[in-house]
Image (cartoon, coloured by chain):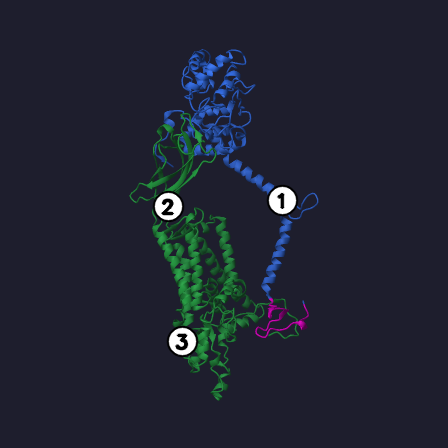
Amino acid sequence: MADAQDKKIDAATGTALKGHEWDGIAELDTPLPRWWLWTFYATIVFAVGYVIAYPAIPMLTDYTRGMLGWSSRGALDKELAAREAQVAPLHKVIAERAITDLPGRPRLMQAAVEGGRAAFKVHCVQCHGSGAAGARGYPNLNDDDWLWGGDLATIEKTITDGVRNPDHDATRQSMMPAFGRDQLLTAAQVDDVVAHVRVISHQDKASPAAQRGAQLFADNCAVCHGADGKGNRTLGAPNLTDGIWLYGGDADTIRQTVWNSRQGVMPRWDDKLDKATIRMLAAYVHSLGGGEATTAAAETADDVAR
Amino acid sequence: MLPADTALPLYEKRRGVYPKAVDGFYRRLKWAIMAVTLAIYWVTPWIRWDRGPYAPDQAVLVDLAHRRFYMFAIEIWPHEFYYVAGLLIMAGIGLFLVTSAVGRAWCGYACPQTVWTDLYQHVERFIDGDRNAQIRLAKASWTPAKLVRRLTKWSVWLAIAFATGGAWIFYFADAPSLQRAFWTGTAAPTAYATVALLTATTFILGGFMREQVCIYMCPWPRIQTAMLDETSLVVTYKDWRGEQRASLKKAQAAPGDFGDCIDCNQCVAVCPTGIDIREGPQVGCITCALCIDACDQVMAQIGRPRGLIDYCTQDDAEAEKRGAPSRPVLKTLLRPRTLAYLAGWSGIGAAMLFALGARTRVDIAAQQDRNPIFVALSDGAIRNAYTVKLRNMEARPRPMEVSVEGLADAQLWTDTMVRERARPVIRTMVPADSVAKLRIFIAAPPTGPQRQDFAFTVRATDHEGGGDREDARFERPQ
């Protein structure tokens, strides 16, 4: 505290002045109220208690842990465990029911779709993309074109066992021959088949080459892709007449496909994910817009009441 | 006054304030305002208001859990929070208006700190006696008798504090059921914590802090200091009439030599903030006007005209000093500044009332899927997907119809339908007082602009009708 003798007293208020002055304006040295001081002491006491109870002081290799043993990581672990416990009954219900029951139970379906959305972001986006829009060679899961089928049970089977998964007997399996590389067809014949496919997919007009290709198609391709080229889902043979191409519908790409064949692989997931997660993934993929009804009855009424 | 040679204290002990009871016009006005404000505070949550089976029947309810604010016939949704902002602005301008018209009337009469302190002081007088008895008791040593008095007083204070803190929570939940839950120990921990906190603050602020809140803690006196001018009503000691002060005996001995003030100190004794109004306007004066009542009583007793201490503007004080007759208080109220505040205040109020009357209770919002933006379908059509939210702000379920405008050959379907059943209009029932979320797929021919603007429209199909539209965009591959 400064020398009391040096202090000037403000005549109007009877309060001492701080002693400095700006343009004739001086500052009063008004005493703080006592309760303010006690509040200040209380915050000090609180701070000491806090340092004892909670992690506070950084040390060289560690930090003071606090008596309560609280840590943000521990808090996160607790929250995650609580979340697991919270969704466990839901996962149990989803795993125990038939997947075809889901559409009749909108709330369960919604929960499954949301769970699947989360799991998709972890396990599937690497190939199918974060919006499930796929890429060249990786199917777009939003559209209405399915290689193996687009109803809930079929999607679940595809996710469970994968496609052309080596060392797994139950996997979806189909082998398109490499017609050119293995010399099953000549280069000219392959060109003719390509011309035919371009015609049935409404990209080119009929031509003599396409007519020659039609016969070759019937002899070599129709066994899987069907006489009309509309594909066969039990074999995973794509529909060649629609507007959707997994690798591309231009003549060069189709020629490459016929010459070398395509052997896209999707891993099986039953050895990595539990049944409920796979089922939720199927529900999510089904919900993206191209999902097909298992039976006619699964479709709900026109009027959407929720 | 501090002698120059004493050491200056860094911290000041609180000076005790023991306001004396007084009666008079302003005291009665304060009683009335206290009764009305406390009644509003305690009764409001218990008023019922029938809103049908889908909404709570409490007239005033801030339903934080469901994000709804109910005030009699008005229901406010979170996105309509600008009404609350408008109310806050009106409250702010209202304070300006009151300050410019009648000075610190808010502080003196209606501020909760003033009202509860007043109540607490009344309890104090009832138990401890009036000013002199209180001073004696404060100085007395801690005898059992004093302890009993103190404990009695604190208990009553605590009961009032508990009733105050307890009433607060009823604004945030259904009052009757919350009260049952509260007493049976099944209410939310937040409720108990809130009551405990507000009980503690009421007890401390009303019982012990009192004028310290006004002088040290409240920002409003600082703002008011800037708002007061020479035409603002303040409580004024008319020193040209009162000085030279002298005791009644002296003044009667030599009438003419002395002013009307007989230095009886009654104005200081009744002051709830412990100031001497005769020192002039000061931050401690909350213009509660109790000193006016006290002085008027004394003036009546000694046969002098009332109003030695009175509401008066600084301009009028100067005029009176020069000999002009005192101007009626009401005439000081109407001046341009006051009218400007009044215009602003009522303008905002009228605009909000108009907006409330004209607002539609149906609302649509549409968000387009961004990943993927579009999906090519096997028949060549292009599909876009939207999350459409239909907001039904009425407390009853309503049938609604969603369609699109400006998108030719559009097929609409939802995630619970299949494309084969697509149609131009989606019908749905939106539950009472809630938002329905629809996932709507739209397929359109691939020929068309890469980015096509269109609009979603919603129409309520019940008798009341009403609707809304939302601009959206349909995207196609290049």
Tag 2 subunit: B
Tag 3 subunit: B
Task: Tell me which segment is drawn in magenta.
Answer: A2-31
Query: Drawn colour of chain B?
Result: green
Which secondary structure, mark 2?
A: loop
Query: Which of these two is toward me, A187 or B141?
Result: A187
Query: Which of these two is toward me, B355 or B197?
Result: B355
- x and y percentages locating residue A65 in the rendered image: 65, 45
**Amino acid type of disc 3?**
Arg
Location of mark 1 (residue): A69
Tag 1 subunit: A
Residue B353 lies in what quarter of the image? bottom left
Answer few, some or many: residues within 10 Å of disc 1's Cα (few below 14, many 20 plus, some between 14 and 19): few
- x and y percentages locating residue B393 in the rendered image: 37, 45
- Residue A21 inside the magenta-drawn segment: yes
Location of mark 2 (residue): B393
Chain shaded blue: A
- x and y percentages locating residue A272 in the rendered image: 55, 27
Instruction: Give the distance between the C-alpha atoms of the residues marked 3 and 1, in whole angstroms.
Output: 72 Å
Q: Is there one chain holding both mark 3 and mark 1? A: no
- Residue B436 inside the magenta-drawn segment: no
Instruction: Give the distance between the C-alpha atoms of the residues marked 1 and 2, in whole angstroms.
Output: 48 Å
Residue B410 lies left or right of residue A4; in this view the side is left
Query: Which of these two is toward me, B337 or B238?
Result: B337
Instruction: Give the distance between the C-alpha atoms of the residues marked 3 and 2, in whole angstroms.
Output: 54 Å
Front tag of 3 and 1: 3
Location of mark 3 (residue): B327
